[in-house]
Amino acid sequence: EAQVTQNPRYLITVTGKKLTVTCSQNMNHEYMSWYRQDPGLGLRQIYYSMNVEVTDKGDVPEGYKVSRKEKRNFPLILESPSPNQTSLYFCASSPRTSGLELFFGEGSRLTVL
Amino acid sequence: SQQGEEDPQALSIQEGENATMNCSYKTSINNLQWYRQNSGRGLVHLILIRSNEREKHSGRLRVTLDTSKKSSSLLITASRAADTASYFCATERGTALIFGKGTTLSVSS
C-alpha cells in the first residue's frame, strides 16, 4: 500500500530533550516536506527536500533540523524542544517537484512540557 | 504566510444538501488544489484545477476557478455524514504548497 508513515504518532516530552520524528514513504517520491498545524494558524511548512541531500527552509524552520540521506526517509529533529513546538506535525511527499500533489502521513501530535 | 483564504470558516448542513465553500487567493497561480482533512488525520488530495481550466468534476465534487477574481469554489453535492471534515485550498509558492485555514463542514443525518 502506498503510504507515508510517521513515528511516533503521539509523544509527550520535556523541554530540552532531543527528539526525532521519523518519516518514510514507499512511493519513490522525489519531494518531501514537513508541516506543523496549529489552531488559528493553519498549516505552515517547516522544511522541504527536493531530492536526496537537498533540503531547504520553509516558513517556520527555527528550532528544527532535517536530513535526507535516503530518498524514502525525511526525519524531523528537534534538538532542544520548547513548549512553543507543541503542535501536530505532518510529513508529506509528492511525485513531482513542481505541480506538487502532496500525500500526507497521519500526523504526529507532540506535546512539550 | 497564507495565500488562500477559505470562506465560510464553518458550515453546517443536513445530509442530502449541497455544500459550497470558497477560496480566495492573492497572487497569480499555475493551479489550485483542494484537500480534505478528517479530524486530526492527515490531509487527502481531492482535486487539482489548472489556471487554464474553469471547471472540473470528480464524483460528487465540482470545482470552479475564476482567475480574474482570484477565487475558487468547491461544491459537494448530495452531502453525506462521511463528508464531515475540514476542507483546504492550496496554491503553490515556489517549492511549497501554501494552505488556507480551511472550512469546517459538518453534515448531520
Image (spheres, coloured by chain):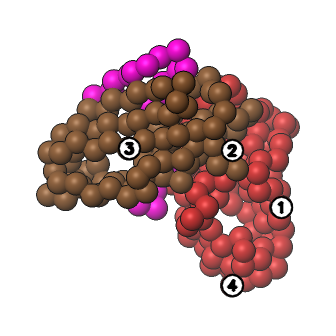
Q: Nearer the viewer, mark 3 or mark 2?
A: 3
Chain letter for the residue marked with disc 4 in the picture: A
Disc 4 to disc 1, C-alpha distance:
18 Å
Q: Amino acid at mark 1?
A: Glu
Q: Are marks 3 and 2 on the same chain?
A: no
Mark 4 or mark 1: which comes first in sequence?
1
Chain that is coloured red in the picture: A
- The residue carrying mark 1 is A62
Of the 4 image quadrants, the one containing the C terminus of chain B is bottom left
Tell me: B53 left or right of A65: left
Bounds of the magenta segment: B38-59
Mark sitting on residue A33: 2
Residue B80: give x, y in percent of width and height: 20, 48
Residue at mark 4 to residue at mark 2: CA–CA distance: 26 Å
Q: Chain of mark 1?
A: A
Q: Would residue A84 be seen by someone viewing this image from the given angle? A: yes
Could you say whether the residue bearing mark 4 is in a helix, strand or loop? Answer: loop
Q: Residue at label 4? A: A113
Q: Specify which label sits upstream in the sequence, 1 or 2.
A: 2
Question: For residue B44: magenta?
Answer: yes
Q: CA distance from mark 3 to mark 1?
A: 34 Å
How far, Cα to Cα, is label 1 from label 2?
Answer: 15 Å
> What whole-number distance in Å separates the C-alpha atoms at marks 3 and 2?
27 Å
Residue at numbered disc 3 = B21
**Magenta residue check for A112:** no
Chain B appears what colour?
A: brown
